[in-house]
Image (tube, rainbow, N blue to C red):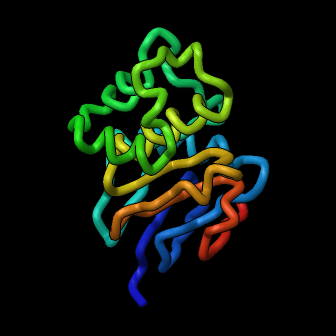
Amino acid sequence: MAERVKVWSGRREWTAEVDRVELWGPDATRLLEGIALGRVPVSVDGAALSPPFGWLPPDRLPFPHLSARENLGYTGASRARVDAVAERLGLTEVLDRRSRSLDRAQRERVALGRAVLASDRLWLLDGVGALAPLLDPPPGVVILARDFAGAATRWEV
């Protein structure tokens, strides 16, 4: 099988033939952040990618002054895509509420939705944990995540 995803940082290189990779180790968060900021090169199917990527940082905070809908739409996604992701994540009832008024679980789902809507090629998820069952990636999306039980392979970083 051909190389699906490749990441290289300094003298280390990681490759995988799958779409779902769990990053494990003390530098996993730093590696994900480096990729998100464009400091660490990544390629998928031999093509170099550059930001923006779908990025779920460890703090997972949506913009508090925006509604859930505005947070999801911040990515530039169409209203139809925002509504579809909101439905998948169970957010339709709170779309018009300001993020600061949402409970923690709802804020985390808004942040995940923003990451999902930001890219259709690469999602970088730091500590996805309990949110993993909510993921429904379209074909071709590569997921690099810390704390991701649904991963097909694991990189120690």
Is residue 8 something that shows in the picture?
A: no
Residue 69: name its quadrant: top left
The residue nearer to you, when weighing 81 against 39, is 81
The image shows residue 59 at horizontal and vertical percentages of 65, 29
Where residue 4 sits in the image (x, y, percent)? Answer: 41, 74
Q: Quadrant of the N terminus?
A: bottom left
Image quarter where the C terminus lies is: bottom right
Identity of the residue furthest to the top in this view: 65
Establish if 65 lies above or below 112.
above
Q: Does residue 96 appear to the left or right of 14 in the view shown? A: left
Residue 10 or residue 157, whichever sits in front: 157
Above or below, comparing residue 19 to residue 8 in the picture: below
- Name the side, left or right, on which 36 lies relative to 131: left
How many labels, in total?
A: 0
* On screen, residue 80 above or below 44: above
Can the viewer see residue 65 in this picture? yes
**Residue 148 in picture, x, y percent from top left:** 66, 60
Residue at image position (58%, 29%) is: 107
Give the farthest residue toward the front.
Answer: 93
Identify the residue at image location x=35%, y=43%: 117
Query: Residue at 47% across / 18% down in the picture?
Result: 97
Residue at image position (42%, 79%) is 3
